[in-house]
Image: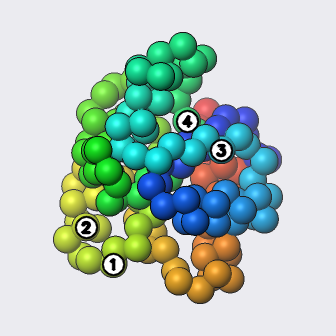
Amino acid sequence: MIHPGYILLADDNATDAELTIRALELGGVKQQIVWVQDGEAALHYVFCKGVYAQRTSGNPRLMLLDLHMPKIDGLDVLAQIKADPATRATPVVIMSSSDQQSDMLRSYERHANSYIVKPVDFKQFTDQVGTLGKYWMGVNRVE
């Protein structure tokens, strides 16, 4: 069963974001997907600040986070989300084009739940993201 909730996608690359959203849809994920284009917007959305101060509160069921973004990078976003008791349990999956061991290690040191290297091949990308969405939104237990 797919559980309710929303996915927060933080990625500054519009093409990658569109492909991710499409891949989730093809994978059968029906939840709302909220896309923000930089780390500052991601934090504002999660913590209901700035332009998102009036939004209905509630943590994302899953956050897909790019590492290299403007304003605040993904590692800092991850650290702030995992440092706050109200958001600490939110699953955060790093989706990056970086396959550098140092990026993976720093992500896990900041308590990322998973680290995915974005494949270049469209079919591999859609398969990987679809599987990821099914797992975190349908298989993973939150209650």
- The CA distance from mark 1 to mark 4 is 26 Å
- The CA distance from mark 2 to mark 4 is 23 Å
Residue lying at 29% horizontally and 44% vertically, measured from the top left = 71
What label does residue 103 carry, if any?
A: 2
Residue lying at 71% horizontally and 40% vertically, measured from the top left = 32
Please, what secondary structure does the residue beneath circle 1 have? Answer: loop
What label does residue 41 carry, if any?
A: none
Say which of 22 and 104 sits in front.
22
Say which of 116 and 49 sits in front.
49
Left or right: 112, with 130 as reference point: left
Residue lying at 58% horizontally and 65% vertically, measured from the top left = 15
Please, what secondary structure does the residue beneath circle 4 have? Answer: loop
Left or right: 96, with 1 as reference point: left
Q: Earlier in the sequence, mark 2 or mark 3?
A: 3
What label does residue 99 carry, if any?
A: 1
| Image marks 3 and 4: residues in contact by CB distance under 8 Å | no
Count neighbours of disc 1 (C-alpha within 10 A) and say few if under 14, some if 14 to 19, many if 20 or more.
Answer: few
| Amino acid at pointer 4 | Pro
| Amino acid at pointer 3 | Ile
Please, what secondary structure does the residue beneath circle 2 have? Answer: helix
- The CA distance from mark 1 to mark 3 is 25 Å
Scheme of colours in the image: rainbow
Please, what secondary structure does the residue beneath circle 3 have? Answer: strand
- The CA distance from mark 2 to mark 1 is 7 Å
Q: Residue furthest bottom?
A: 121
| Image marks 2 and 1: residues in contact by CB distance under 8 Å | yes
What label does residue 60 carry, if any?
A: 4
Q: Earlier in the sequence, mark 2 or mark 4?
A: 4
